[in-house]
Image: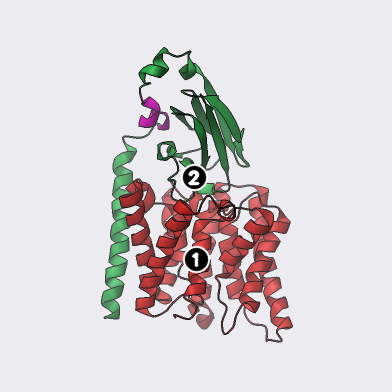
Chain colours: A red, B green
């Protein structure tokens, strides 16, 4: 039990659960109760299925649960159930099959891009945003204990967050207060950007990765937004996947 | 060296968040009424003040849990749009694109809680897309005619 609770993925789950539960309670509706359960269960199911197909031994599906939690927090709350299942399917597919040595893409991000392209389901970020303006806003900082401290991705996190904020404020005239307390950017910085299996571990590469991500977000958002493709996908998610691909060999 | 880098990175992050919190707390006492957003208090220019009452026209848009309704509206130059948050959750009105809101920064009206309203007078013609940054799948457009 002690070993189980000491695993970084389990600790990440423990920090994500309060965010999800609080967000659901604050915006209670039947879909918000059902969709996360479906997303997480289908992620586990698909992970087991694909492991069987790959003739691998089944193991604790902590990665699937963590991916399911992340998807639950950022998927459109009004997404139909089949879209929710599709997001989990695509996430676990990429984790199990798009992997020369290890999987290349952040599974949750891949799932979100898949449903954006196939079902025009845009990323929502409703979960972390629900806590804005409440005393429980600090909950979205909890994952930092895992991603920054346990997984040692503090350079990715700080580089991305700082450079994003500076660029937004200095070059695009953004309100510093809104940028610094943007739940979307905070959640992305602390949970999605530093996913350890798909991002660099070396300090120098972490810094490069963080800078690359923030620059890419602005390039996509500012200069490529007119492209039909960019109308349907979230620049943060897309930048992360491009970053995963480019830094796959630079760990 | 590891500890030092971690301290620097973590300290920078904490510092930024503290600055943000300070700004939030210091602004809260000044901006409790979203309808007092300075953007909505822009004086009409001379052309508008002498034209046929576009400023008297106001179109209402409701934000519910399923999105903006009506999603796409057409108004005259100088007319006002009033957004009401009936979604049950915090929301924003921000220009596209997400997440940097740079297409029409004047339309970055900020946050409004459930039950609150935001309004904006459109001083120029064109098509202006916006979205709820806190649930970026919710978006709409305002087409402004001469």
Kindly report the secondary structure that dominates the magenta region of the rendered protein: helix
Image label count: 2
Image quadrant for the N terminus of chain A?
Answer: bottom right
Note whether A171 is above or below B106 in the view shown.
below
Q: CB under 8 Å between callouts 2 and 1?
A: no
Evaluate whether residue A241 shows in this view: yes
Q: Give the image location of residue B28, x and y in percent.
A: 34, 39
Residue ID for mark 1: A240
Q: Give the image location of residue B2, x and y in percent.
A: 30, 80
- Secondary structure type for disc 1: helix
Q: Give the image location of residue B78, x and y in percent.
A: 46, 23
Q: Quadrant of residue A138?
A: bottom left
Viewer-closest of B44 and A43: B44
Which chain is indicated by disc 2?
A: B
Q: Quadrant of residue A214?
A: bottom left
Residue ID for mark 2: B96
Mark 2 surroundings: few (<14), some (14-19) or many (≥20) residues within 10 A = many
């Amino acid at each position: 039990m002690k070993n189980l609770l000491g695993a970084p993925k389990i600790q990440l789950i423990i920090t994500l659960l309060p965010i999800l539960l609080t967000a659901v309670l604050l915006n209670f509706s039947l879909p918000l109760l059902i969709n996360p359960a479906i997303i997480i269960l289908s992620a586990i199911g698909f992970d087991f299925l694909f492991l069987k197909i790959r003739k691998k031994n089944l193991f604790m599906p902590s990665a699937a649960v963590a991916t399911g939690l992340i998807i639950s927090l950022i998927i459109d709350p009004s997404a139909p159930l089949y879209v929710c299942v599709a997001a989990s399917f695509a996430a676990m597919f990429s984790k199990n099959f798009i992997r020369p040595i290890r999987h290349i893409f952040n599974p949750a991000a891949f799932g979100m891009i898949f449903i954006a392209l196939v079902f025009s389901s845009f990323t929502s970020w409703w979960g972390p945003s629900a806590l804005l303006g409440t005393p429980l806003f600090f909950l979205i900082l909890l994952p930092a204990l895992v991603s920054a401290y346990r997984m040692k991705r503090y350079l990715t996190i700080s580089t991305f967050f700082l450079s994003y904020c500076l660029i937004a404020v200095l070059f695009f005239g953004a309100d510093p207060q809104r940028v610094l307390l943007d739940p979307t950017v905070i959640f992305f910085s602390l949970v999605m950007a530093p996913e350890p299996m798909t991002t660099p571990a070396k300090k120098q590469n972490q810094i490069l990765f963080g800078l690359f991500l923030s620059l890419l977000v602005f390039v996509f958002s500012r200069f490529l937004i007119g492209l039909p493709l960019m109308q349907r996908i979230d620049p943060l998610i897309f930048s992360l996947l491009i970053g995963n691909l480019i830094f796959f060999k630079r760990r | 060296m590891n500890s030092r880098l971690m301290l620097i990175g973590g300290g920078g992050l904490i510092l930024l968040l503290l600055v943000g919190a300070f700004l939030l707390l210091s602004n809260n006492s000044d901006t409790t009424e979203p309808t007092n957003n300075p953007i909505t208090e822009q004086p009409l220019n001379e052309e508008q003040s002498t034209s046929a009452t576009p400023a008297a026209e106001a179109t209402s848009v409701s934000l519910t849990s399923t999105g903006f309704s009506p999603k796409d509206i057409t108004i005259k130059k100088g007319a006002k749009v009033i957004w009401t948050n009936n979604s049950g959750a915090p929301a924003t009105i921000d220009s596209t694109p997400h997440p940097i809101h740079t297409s029409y920064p004047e339309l970055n009206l900020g946050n409004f809680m459930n039950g609150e309203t935001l309004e904006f007078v459109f001083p120029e013609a064109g098509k202006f897309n916006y979205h709820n940054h806190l649930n970026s799948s919710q978006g709409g457009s305002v087409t402004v005619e001469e």
